[in-house]
Structure formats: C-alpha cells, structure tokens
Image (cartoon, rainbow, N blue to C red):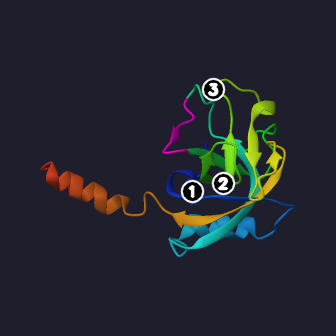
Amino acid sequence: MIMSILSSLIVVAILTSCGGDSTTNKLVKELNSSYTNDGKEVELVGYIAIVSGRAGGTLVSNGKITVGLTNSNWQQKQDAFAQAKINFGKEANYLWLPEKFSLSDVEIYDSKGQKHDVNTKFAIKGIVHYTNKDWEKTLKQEQENQGKKDIQ
C-alpha cells in the first residue's frame, strides 16, 4: 500500500543525480500532515520507481509519466513516499521506457541530459499540488447536487 501522500501529492520534477539527504523524511512527514507546502517548491531525495508496468497501467498522459519516489532502489520492495509527474522522452529531465520493458530498459535523464538507470538516487525538485485537498467539500457538493444528505 502506498502512503496517503501518493494520492494527494504531485510534484512536477526536475531531476538531479545526487547522494543522500537527511531532510527528506522530515519533509515527507510535513507533507503528509498539513497543506502548508501547497503551491510551494520542495526537494525530495530518493530513487525513482515506475508505479506499475507500462502495459499494465503506467499511464503516459500529456507527455508525462507518473512515478513513485522511494528510499531504496527499485530492486528492493519498498513503498513510495511521494509521487511525481516526469516528462516522457529522451531529453534532460525526462524518463523513457519502451512499451514492454525490464529494469535495465528504463532510462532516466537528469537536468544535464545525462542518462541514468533506476539504481541512481535523485533530488527531485518541483511544485507541491495536493489533488485531494478539498475532498470533503467536493463530496458534500456532489451529494447536494444529487439530492443526498448525511444521516444524522
């Protein structure tokens, strides 16, 4: 099960190959517990993981692919702590994979256009956008529009 941040946070990514970062876990806790970073630029450090196999549901939409960010490389089973939309292709700040692929086929291009694989740790910098921030308000409006009310 991917943490709640996966369904509520999207970071549009700028990729930089890097070493470790001790502030990521603290920032992830903050992102999970408040909306104070909504609309702000943040940087998270981790490994990029494809959310699911491309043929099995990985969606490329509007030239972007959604990926997870994990604390360990792809080969170790660990849940993503964040989700990012990355440009799909073979240019700087892009990710590419063929229709049918194995781990060795995934190509991740950093901000300088250098190609990396899934075993490279990246700093992903982007703008936080909570997709489910107003879920209660939206649900209530939908229920009112359909003539439904909560039982009291």
Q: Is residue 30 magenta?
A: no
Magenta-highlighted residues: 57-63
Query: Looking at this rendering, what residue extends furthest in the left direction?
Result: 147
Label annotation for residue 14: none
Q: Residues within 10 Å of mark 1 (few under 14, many from 20)?
A: many
Query: In which quadrant is the C terminus drawn?
Result: bottom left
The residue under label 2 is which amino acid type? Phe
Residue under pointer 2: 81
Residue under pointer 1: 5
Q: Which residue is found at the position 76% from the left and 39% from the top?
A: 77
Query: Looking at this rendering, what residue extends furthest in the bottom direction?
Result: 36
Task: Choose mark 2 or mark 3, whichever is in front.
Answer: 3
Answer yes or no: is residue 93 visible. Answer: yes
Residue under pointer 3: 99
Q: Are marks 1 and 2 in contact (CB under 8 Å)?
A: yes
Q: Which residue is found at the position 61% from the left and 30% from the top?
A: 54
> Circle 3 sits in a helix, a strand or a loop, which is it?
loop
Q: Is residue 152 left or right of residue 48?
A: left
The residue under label 1 is which amino acid type? Ile
Q: Measure the alpha-carbon separation of dots 3 and 1.
A: 28 Å
In front of the other: 115 or 102: 115
Q: Residues within 10 Å of mark 2 (few under 14, many from 20)?
A: many
